[in-house]
Image: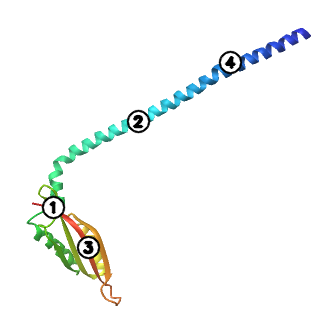
C-alpha cells in the first residue's frame, strides 16, 4: 500500500504541476488577451455611439434648419431695424419712459455705424435715464420685452442727488442693428 500511496502522491503532484503549467502558459495569456479584446470592443462601442449621436444631432440640426429657413426673413426683420423707422424706434422708447415717469435722452446715428453685412450696420446707441430707481428698473424690464433688438454692453446707475429720495441717473451704452 505504501507503493501505491507513493505513486498516487507522485501522480497528484505531477498532475498539479501540469495544471499549474497549463494555467501559467496558456490560460493566463488567453485571459489577458480576452481582456484586451474586451477593452477594444468597449472603445469601438463608445466611438460608434458617439458617431451615432453626432449623426442624429446633424439630422436634427438639418430638420431644424429646414423648419426655420422659411422664417429667416421674418427673423432678420426682427433683429435688424429698418433705416427710416427711427421714429418708430424712438417713439417706442419714449412710450416706455412715459409709462414709468422716467426722463430719457437717446443718442444714436444710423448713418455712422460699423458695416457688419451688406446693407446692415451695427449702430452705437446711448440712452441716458433719470428717475426713481424702481421706475428705471421697470423701464429696463419693459425695454427687454420690446420687439426691438437692443444690445446693452454697459450700464451704470448712480445716485442723482445726495439725499435718499431714490432718484438716480442711469446710462445705457450698447448698439442696435439697422438695415437699409
Residue 49: numbered disc: 2
**Furthest residue in direction bottom, as rendered:** 163
How busy is the neighbourhood of tag 4: few (under 14 within 10 Å), some, or many (20 plus)? few
Q: Secondary structure at mark 3?
A: strand
Q: Secondary structure at mark 4?
A: helix
- Res 146 seen here: no
How far across and down, in percent of the image, does residue 32 sit?
59, 27
Q: Which residue is mark 4?
A: 22
> Are circles 2 and 1 on residues that touch, CB within 8 Å?
no
Give the CA distance from mark 2 to mark 1: 44 Å
Q: Which residue is mark 1?
A: 121
Q: Which residue is mark 3?
A: 172
Give the CA distance from mark 1 to mark 3: 19 Å
Instruction: Looking at the image, tell me whether mark 2 or mark 1 is earlier in sequence order.
Output: 2
Residue at (60% x, 25% y) in the render: 31
Instruction: Looking at the image, tell me whether mark 2 or mark 4 is earlier in sequence order.
Output: 4
Give the CA distance from mark 1 to mark 4: 80 Å
How far across and down, in percent of the image, does residue 18 sit?
72, 16
Residue at (24% x, 79% y) in the render: 129
Instruction: Looking at the image, tell me whether mark 1 or mark 4 is earlier in sequence order.
Output: 4
Relative to residue 94, is residue 8 drawn left or right? right
Amino acid at each position: 500500500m505504501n507503493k501505491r500511496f507513493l505513486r498516487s502522491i507522485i501522480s497528484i503532484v505531477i498532475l498539479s504541476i501540469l495544471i499549474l503549467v497549463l494555467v501559467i502558459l496558456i490560460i493566463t495569456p488567453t485571459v489577458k488577451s480576452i481582456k484586451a479584446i474586451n477593452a477594444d470592443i468597449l472603445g469601438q462601442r463608445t466611438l460608434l455611439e458617439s458617431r451615432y449621436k453626432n449623426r442624429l444631432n446633424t439630422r436634427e440640426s438639418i430638420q431644424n434648419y429646414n423648419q426655420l429657413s422659411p422664417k429667416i426673413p421674418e427673423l432678420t426683420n426682427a433683429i435688424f431695424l429698418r433705416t427710416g423707422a427711427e421714429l418708430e424706434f424712438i417713439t417706442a422708447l419714449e412710450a416706455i419712459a412715459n409709462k414709468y415717469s422716467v426722463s430719457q435722452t437717446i443718442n444714436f446715428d444710423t448713418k455712422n455705424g460699423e458695416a457688419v453685412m451688406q446693407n446692415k450696420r451695427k449702430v452705437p446707441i446711448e440712452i441716458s435715464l433719470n428717475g426713481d430707481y424702481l421706475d428705471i428698473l421697470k423701464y429696463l424690464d419693459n425695454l427687454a420685452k420690446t420687439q426691438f433688438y437692443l444690445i446693452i454692453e454697459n450700464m451704470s446707475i448712480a445716485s442723482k442727488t445726495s439725499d435718499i429720495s431714490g432718484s438716480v441717473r442711469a446710462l445705457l451704452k450698447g448698439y442696435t442693428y439697422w438695415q437699409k
